[in-house]
Amino acid sequence: MKKHIVVIAGDGIGQEVTAVGKQVLDKIAAQYGHEFTYDEALIGHAAIEATGSPLPEETITKSLASDAILFGAVGHPKYDNDPTAKVRPEQGLLGIRKALGLYANLRPIKLFDELLSASSIKPEILKGADILFFRELTGDVYFGERGRKDNGDTAYDTMIYSRYEVERIAIKAFDAAMTRRKKLCSVDKANVLESSRLWREVIQEVSKRYPEVAVEHQFIDAAAMLLIKDPKRFDVVVTGNIFGDILTDEASQIAGSMGMLASASVGDTTGLYEPIHGSAHDITGMGVANPLASILSAALMLDISFGMKEEADAVVNAVDKVLKAGYRTRDIADASTPADKILNTAGMGEQVLAAL
Ligand SMILES: NC(=O)c1ccc[n+]([C@@H]2O[C@H](COP(=O)([O-])OP(=O)(O)OC[C@H]3O[C@@H](n4cnc5c(N)ncnc54)[C@H](O)[C@@H]3O)[C@@H](O)[C@H]2O)c1
């Protein structure tokens, strides 16, 4: 199969891990007789430096013309501590999700058994946890009206959702639940927020079309607690943009590290595949970032955008094999990991390529 992929590596460790994700795609193409062609595009701080915009028009055009996007991360320390900056790298990521109509972010949380000890949660609580998050991406406080008043002394961000926005992600989540354990948990704050009451109303309506799926509703505060207390109780979780942002970072600890979690953003056009982590200023340039989230994002691309299930499984199995062989990057190593098994970014990439 011929596929055209746009690589948007972005900032910080985004550059380092995406290079490895791309190597894995190349290896798969060679092994399975596919032809993957690539183009590169700018976003975030790198794009601001080059063009003045965090999301140049050319990036959108190239993305729309591609079959899938392999994405790294955006962010730069100079903006994190400058709340007055009007142009920010993160606008690039929010903008591309909006421009491409990518409204559903799928975040599978699956623990590789070998990493049970890398998590700060007790192994007996974790073992067997397998959750698929659906985070809504184009609404909520991230896109509602915002501003300042009272001479700048009062600030507001509006949490806003429309019926169709909730309905379309609900359908995706229910469809996924039907292919899994047929359980769906919707997370909101309907005891306080009007937008959450609409969210719950729509989930209840959509649930009537899926009588086989057992539905529960949890408030975000309770869901955050249950996720750590008993992660195995969850199958599919569907939630809004900000609650999903926070809950999935929390859930990354079920998988051992932010460096392990991949995601797929899908919707009306080209799918975008990215690690859930950011640009990680604290380790940028050190060559120690864990590339497995980018590699697993490439696997999601093969599966979801290209329908290459066998190839996707081959990538996941290769990661499993490397972990079983005891190889770790720093973030997933523990006191029992021998020094010669602790690899840098490139070293971990080489092991996965060898396992493939
Ligand atoms: N999707 C994105 O592009 C995205 C997401 C979150 C944050 N950000 C941006 O990233 C910057 C840093 O934010 P942050 O520190 O809150 O979040 P982060 O995800 O970049 O890092 C959080 C912690 O996890 C570690 N970590 C993350 N990915 C790792 C990997 N692959 N291997 C090993 N360790 C890893 C980091 O070293 C850090 O200690 C900010 O500018 C933020 O705005 C971007």
Image (cartoon, rainbow, N blue to C red):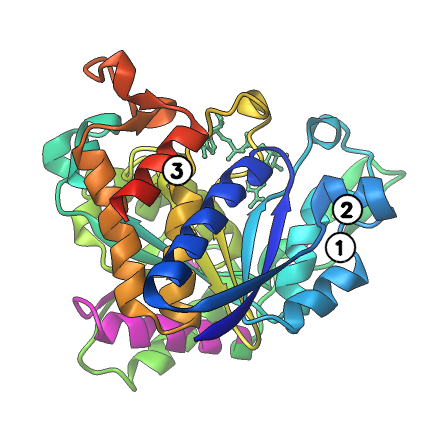
Residue 100, given in percent of the width and then of the height, sits at 63, 69
Residue corresponding to mark 3: 349
Residue drawn at the location 58% of the way across and 35% of the way down: 279
Q: What is the crowding at mark 1: few (fewer than 14 residues within 10 Å), some, or many (at least 20)?
A: many
Q: State how far apart marks 2 and 1 are (Cα).
A: 7 Å
Q: Which residues are magenta?
A: 165-191
Identity, as a three-letter code, of the amino acid under mark 3: Gly
Position of 342 compared to 148: left or right? left
Give me the disc on residue 323: none
Identity, as a three-letter code, of the amino acid under mark 2: Ala
Residue 329, given in percent of the width and then of the height, sits at 35, 26
Query: Taking 211 as reference, is 277 above or below it?
Result: above
Residue drawn at the location 19% of the way across and 70% of the way down: 182
Q: Secondary structure at mark 2?
A: helix
Residue drawn at the location 85% of the way across and 38% of the way down: 152
Residue lying farthest to the bottom in this orientation: 209
